[in-house]
Image (spheres, rainbow, N blue to C red):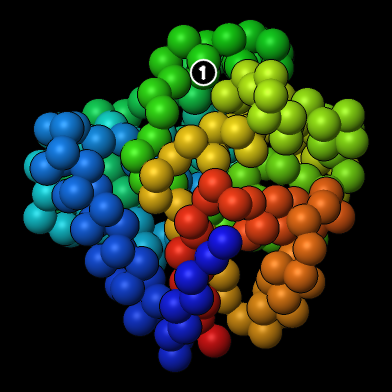
Amino acid sequence: MFVWHEQENAATAAQALADAVAAALQTALNEKGHAVLAVSGGRSPIAFFEALSQKDLNWQNIGITLVDERIVPTTHADSNTGLVREYLLKNNATIATWIPVIEDGKSETELQPEVVVAYALKHYKQPDVLVLGMGSDGHTASLFPQAPQLQVQAAINEADDPTLIHTTPVTAPHERVSMTLGAIAKTPNVFLAIQGAEKKAVFDKAAARADTEYPTSLILNHQGINCHVYYAH
């Protein structure tokens, strides 16, 4: 299940998404007094991060974490942790609480997948709001179409759901730790941001049926997930 929101360009889409995410966080704050936001990495969300960081929210009562992370040191150029610290944990959001996935100060050799998952699970808090992206191969979070963990259903088996799992992309570098389909389904507010005609074509295929060929389809066709899709031309 999804709701479509179409914007003329990336700048207006980033602002519209920031407005919607801020409203969802405010609702959680009103209801519980605290909120948890999980975001995705990559270069696409930077404008959204910067817009959201300027929102007038009680950031001291908001925890921020990652939907997924590459298993690399937090100082690595490909680290989503570093990206979020640079572009989201600033302005008004400086005082938000960071919920870590990768332990700071660890070298690549120290970051073995089972150690990383155990560390991330120890700190894990169920998000109230979650923002996903989508790759041109149809992956979302680090649920990659050819990852062996999807082929054996480990990442998408909601009956025996581990919340976080190690995944091995075939089409991208670095081992990953990712929220599972079950953890995503438990999140009340799910957003997906995509941009451009190429991604739109993949999205249309993913929306047509639920299978692991395009893992985003598992979100879009899930009866328990109400996903708001923000698309920029």
Q: Name the spot of residue 144 as percent of width and height, x first.
A: 77, 46
Q: Residue at x 42, y 16 (%)?
A: 123
Q: Residue at x 41, y 28 (%)?
A: 126
Quadrant of res 1: bottom right
Q: Residue at x 19, y 49 (%)?
A: 27
Residue underneath mark 1: 120
Identified by mark 1, the residue type is Ala
59 sits left or right of 200 in the view: left
Instruction: Return the residue nearer the eye: 132 or 4.
Output: 4
Q: Secondary structure at mark 1?
A: helix
User: Which quadrant, please, contains the C terminus?
Assistant: bottom right
Quadrant of res 199: bottom right
Q: Residue pushed farthest front? A: 223
Q: Name the spot of residue 4 as percent of width and height, x first.
A: 50, 76
67 sits left or right of 31 in the view: right
Residue 141 appears anywhere in the view: yes
- Asked if 208 appears above or below 72 in the picture, the reply is below
